[in-house]
Amino acid sequence: MSLGFICFTIFLSILFAYARATVTIINGGDETIWPAVYTEKGDTVNPTGIKLDSHQQYDLKVPDSWSGTIWARTGCTGDPNSDFHCEVGDCGTKKMECLDRKPEPPATQVKLNLVPKGGSSSSYEVDMKDGFGVSVTVTPFETSCQKVMCIQNLDDDCPNWLAVYSSEGRKIGCKSPCFFTKEPKYCCTGEFASPQKCDKNQYTELLDNKCPDVVSNAFDGSHFTCSGGTSFFILFN
């Protein structure tokens, strides 16, 4: 093997390492969660399903030019290869791997749109406009970029008619009125399709009061940017 080939291989390895970002997913709660990953744009990221026991973490490697969604599933049972189901955040594959499937609401969704270092800006948001499950904190590695926090347990505050209940009768998730009813007044569609006519409701007021940095409806612009490329910590609890 020639010295030139070896040097070229090392160069490619270094280039590949620098062309990736890390998303460290952390389970800060007391119960097991099953984070999942959906690739919107860019090379598909694997694994697409992860199991994290309490206080475990996983370093997910993603391309530095990538768009996708990361969320936490809870209350999961069954064979991870053939009969897997989650009470909140299920993706419908009947496997622990979500493959190319998005979450079934409600779910707390972290959405990332990453760009390489030297590019414009990476953007990120916590999307709860269809509902939520666990609380979350998103922290960019770049300390100058804003942290997004929704650390309160909101499940108990979910209106009963929107709540998802466990088999023991506990509130474990919350559907948004838009997702649950599909009515234009809740979804900000039809005659309500403008920021001025998209009225607040019991659900959006709950989020605006307790988690003002999350996306609560179709016209909520609560997303953030970070110059150049960055990696992230995502803490679910």
Image (spheres, rainbow, N blue to C red):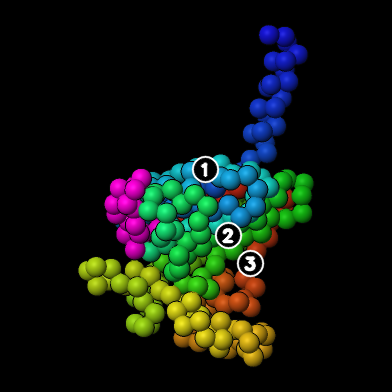
Mark 2 or 1: in front is: 1
Magenta residues span: 73-87
Q: Which mark is residue 223?
A: 3
Q: In the image, what residue occupies the spot 69% across and 21% down?
A: 9
Disc 2 crowd, CA 10 A, few/some/many (<14, 14-19, 20+): many
Disc 3 crowd, CA 10 A, few/some/many (<14, 14-19, 20+): some
Q: Examine the image and state in which quarter residue 214 appears.
A: bottom right
Quadrant placement of the C terminus: bottom left
Question: Is disc 1 placed on a helix, strand or loop?
Answer: loop
Left or right of 224 on screen, residue 35: left
Q: In the image, what residue occupies the spot 29% across and 52% down?
A: 78
Residue 199 magenta-drawn? no
Q: Amino acid at mark 2?
A: Lys
Above/below status of 134 relative to 220: above
Q: Which residue is mark 2?
A: 111
Above/below status of 10 relative to 40: above
Left or right of 62 on screen, residue 27: left
Q: Position of residue 90 (x, y in %)?
A: 41, 60
Q: Which residue is mark 1?
A: 46
Q: Nearer the viewer, residue 26 or 129?
A: 129
Question: Is disc 2 placed on a helix, strand or loop?
Answer: strand
Q: Earlier in the sequence, mark 1 or mark 3?
A: 1
Quadrant placement of the N terminus: top right
Mark 1 or 3: in front is: 1
Q: Amino acid at mark 1?
A: Asn
Q: Earlier in the sequence, mark 3 or mark 2?
A: 2
Question: Is disc 3 placed on a helix, strand or loop?
Answer: loop
Q: Amino acid at mark 3?
A: His
Q: Position of residue 181 (x, y in %)?
A: 46, 83
Look at the numbered discs 2 and 1 and tell me whether their residues touch, using CB distance below 8 Å.
no
